[in-house]
Amino acid sequence: LQVQGLWKLFCTLELPLIKILAVMETHKIHVNKQELKKTSEILGLRLKELEQEAHQVAGERFLLTSNCQLREVLFEKLKLHALCEKLHRTEIQQLVSTSEVVLNKLQDLHPLPKIILEYRQVHKMKSTYVDGLRTCMRKGYISSTWNQTGTVTGRLSAKHPNIQGISKHPVRITKKQYIKGKEEEIETISPRTLFVSKKGYTFLAADFSHIELRILADLSSEPELLKLFQQPETTDIFSTLASQWKGIPSEQVKHADREQAKRIVYSVVYGAGKERLADSLGITPLQASQFIESFMQKYKKVHEFTKKTIEQCRDKGYVVSIMGRKRPLANINAQDYKLRTQAERQAVNFIVQG
């Protein structure tokens, strides 16, 4: 560890953290078993309804969880790809993708893609966040196992269950009514409401405000970003960023402008490429590339920071975080463009995340 320059990181961060994680693993979190069972049944019923709807609009029975069978129905039978612009294809076989991005583009052309999107959402909620909890429960409680060496960036991970990954986004379920004249009910299901705090206690959620963006501002010494964080906390960071980037008054910033600024920042921080940014904004990869370029032109110090980080990584073959953590990136000098650019994004991402 001393030879690799990791001794300080080990002594000041990793070693003291072991005790904290050990205590965390002894704490049990109560889960409402009755509500868990009821939620699982509601989701299961909705899955059956969606399956029937899908078979009806497709005109045949097929397995909704099979991408191969879904592809046959969407593109060989219904030929929806012919009604839409160029769609994403799978990397290896170059088949038209059945990803969420593609289904979102197709959902106005036929009822089936929308049904599949809801089916996937409900299935994920049931299998991962509801039934997944049930398999990890012991006498009405869960207690996660924490791993401090499970990610390349040094972030913590958890399993049995992954308590960090419990979705905060609720699912709205339409409960069909089979009695004439009775209106359909909408039920909102959020897996986080299944957890129950101990008597006399309450759950508290705390987070650092825009921590990744703050770190990026510090590492790059970008004056515009640094100035941004010296303003009152009430300021909407991403609206202000959009205003600066596009050169328009803050009161004229639209939701789309704010969303673009936010997505571009996090594409830099999290190492997302132009393709993923294009998908998230519903634009072409060329437009996404132009957005990133114009953003980097505005915030030149951020551009200089990313460029310098990549150059240092090319020279050394690894990157080092603020705390001294190292990440080797074998593909940083690869001939393959895709592998090389992925490693470049990972280098910048590691510096900020690590």
Image (cartoon, grey):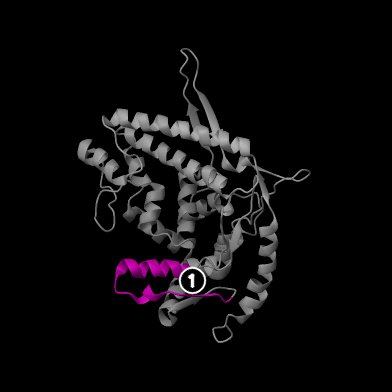
Can residue 329 be found in the magenta stretch? Answer: yes
- How many discs mark residues in the rendered view? 1
Can residue 332 be found in the magenta stretch? Answer: yes
Q: Quadrant of the C terminus?
A: bottom right
- The region drawn magenta spans 324-348
Compared with 127, 149 (above or below) is below
Q: Which residue is mark 1?
A: 305
Q: Determine whether the residue tagged by mark 1 lies in a helix, strand or loop.
A: helix
Query: Please, which residue is most extreme toward the front here?
Result: 139
Which residue occupies the foreground of this view, 340 or 154? 154
Query: Please, which residue is most extreme toward the right here?
Result: 200
Name the spot of residue 313 as percent of width and height, x first.
44, 77
Residue at image location 26% in from the left, 44% down from the top: 85
> What amino acid type should be assigned to the residue bearing mark 1?
Phe
Is 2 situated left or right of 349 in this image?
Answer: right
Is 328 situated left or right of 71 in this image?
Answer: right
Which quarter of the figure has residue 315?
Answer: bottom left
